[in-house]
Amino acid sequence: MSRRPRLAALATSISAALLVVAGQPALADRATPLPAAFSRAAAAQDVPRDLLVALAYAETHLDGHAGKPSASGGYGVMHLVSNPSNHTLEKAAELTGLPVEKLRADDASNVLGGAAVLRSYADELGLDENARKDAGRWYRAVAKYAAAASPELARLYADAVYEGLGLGVSARGVTVKPQEVTADRGEYAATRDLSAQAEILSADYPDATWVAASSSNYTASSRPSSYAIDRVVIHVTQGSYAGTISWFQNPSAQVSAHYVVKSSSGAITQMVREKDIAWHAGNWTYNTRSIGIEHEGYVSDASWFTDAMYRSSAALTKAICDKYGIPKDRSHIIGHNEVPGATHTDPGSYWNWTTYMNYVTGGGTPSWSTTVDNTTAGQFSASSNWGTSSYSSQRYGADYRFANPVAASDPAWYQATIPSAGTYKVEVWYPADAGYNSSAPYIVAASGGNQTVYVDQRSGGGSWRSLGTFSLNAGTFNVVGVSRWTSGTGYVIADAVRISR
């Protein structure tokens, strides 16, 4: 493997550090706009720029939080971590020659540090210059960046990053267009997919996946016989979904919650049994009497609080209230900031309590929604090239359609009658399988022109998955299509779509 590009990148980083020492203006000293910071860091470290952005988006939505740490001790846009089990902040300082103080607080420095750490992992994996040009080949390096407690969590983390490439990113002036990327999972291909609904489910809530927290982070009990349960406490993770799950598995965390909810899809992971006492409220009495629900995101950034998250979490809270006879009101469903003696501010001013409580009490149903399956009469069409299968138990309805990828669109179309022009949420359902397509193109006929979103159908199946929100015209037309034109490998699947306003 040639080392010249890596040596050149290191020389650039060292030169920048020397300029800082000499008091001369350097890249990290100037108020570098975030788009330029990503481009420069990607070029300096020979990391795919869009992959670097997608990783940062999965971690922080590109918000450096003014140098303040996350719950697990991560700093900046790239979430460079300094805690007992993860030292990517210190590693970035070693690789770039920049002081940790600057890496914590300066966006451009932080992005450069994250790129350097990611590149070091690619070097350890032996990615040569040609391999580094293919974003899909970086999958194992991205998984290593997670510093996850298990291979399953490393895969969950990396899948979220590659999901960002497929769905596209637009935040804080930085844009990544949706694109086809076939992720080379390597050994992670055989790892349990925590995104799949058919995986190990929780004992307490059937729509949650079970991943146990470290026994060092909660107290075993026999609630509600040992303590009555009369509260639900709403939290915000101050970190990513995968990162929070991993942190709760770390014995040094000394913190946990019963459930964690994902921002983009509303997926739920249970980590502590409801009978046991999670350490989430900072108040022992409230710990003993409550169920704690963490929500992916940061208090200071409203972009994390999606409708999918609100609906999913509210359904969970409703189920908990029904189970234990908890009144569905704001005296019993409270924020962490409302716990006596609390020093935390979550869920914060961006959390929409009105919307959330409407969903909990049943008053927040969509104003309009329609579901179209591949068997819906008159609303699904596909050529004879699309076969029919009932192989996977993750299917929606009796069966689903499949086809080989080709260099021609030949889409399967879902038709719907949109009642009025406006913004609509589009979700898709498909069964996941290792033999299904790594980059299936979903076409949404938006009012401004067709938009394509790429979905890795090898994972995350068996539940509704959001493609995003789109501006749609009124009328009856083919709203969503599944194209066969992809360089991704495996069968392209067309099962069901849901459109709601």
Image (cartoon, helix red, strand yellow):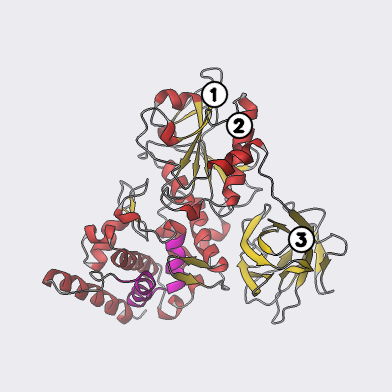
User: Is the C-beta separation of discs 1 and 3 under 8 Å?
Assistant: no
> Of callouts 2 and 1, which one flags the residue occurring earlier in the amino acid sequence?
1
Amino acid type of the residue that numbered disc 3 sits on in the rendered structure = Pro
Q: Are marks 2 and 1 in contact (CB under 8 Å)?
A: yes
104 relative to 383, above or below: above
- Percent across and percent down for residue 462 are 68, 52
Tell me which segment is drawn in magenta.
32-57
Is label 3 or label 2 in front?
Answer: 3
Task: Give the residue pinned by disc 2.
Answer: 320
Kindly state the secondary structure of the residue where label 3 is placed: loop
Q: For residue 273, which quarter of the picture?
A: top right
Q: Position of residue 384 (x, y in %)?
A: 85, 74
Task: Rate crowding at label 1 as few (under 14), some (14 to 19) or many (20 or more) other CA atoms within 10 Å.
Answer: many
Q: Nearer the viewer, residue 264 or 44?
A: 264
- Can the viewer see residue 266 in this picture? no
Q: Residue at 22% of width from left, 57% of height from top?
A: 101
Q: Give the side of residue 18 with respect to residue 405, left or right.
A: left
Q: Look at discs 1 and 3 and give the one toward the viewer.
A: 3
41 is within the stretch colored magenta: yes
Query: Quadrant of residue 349 in the image?
Result: top left
Amino acid found under the numbered disc labelled 1 = Ile
Q: Earlier in the sequence, mark 1 or mark 3?
A: 1
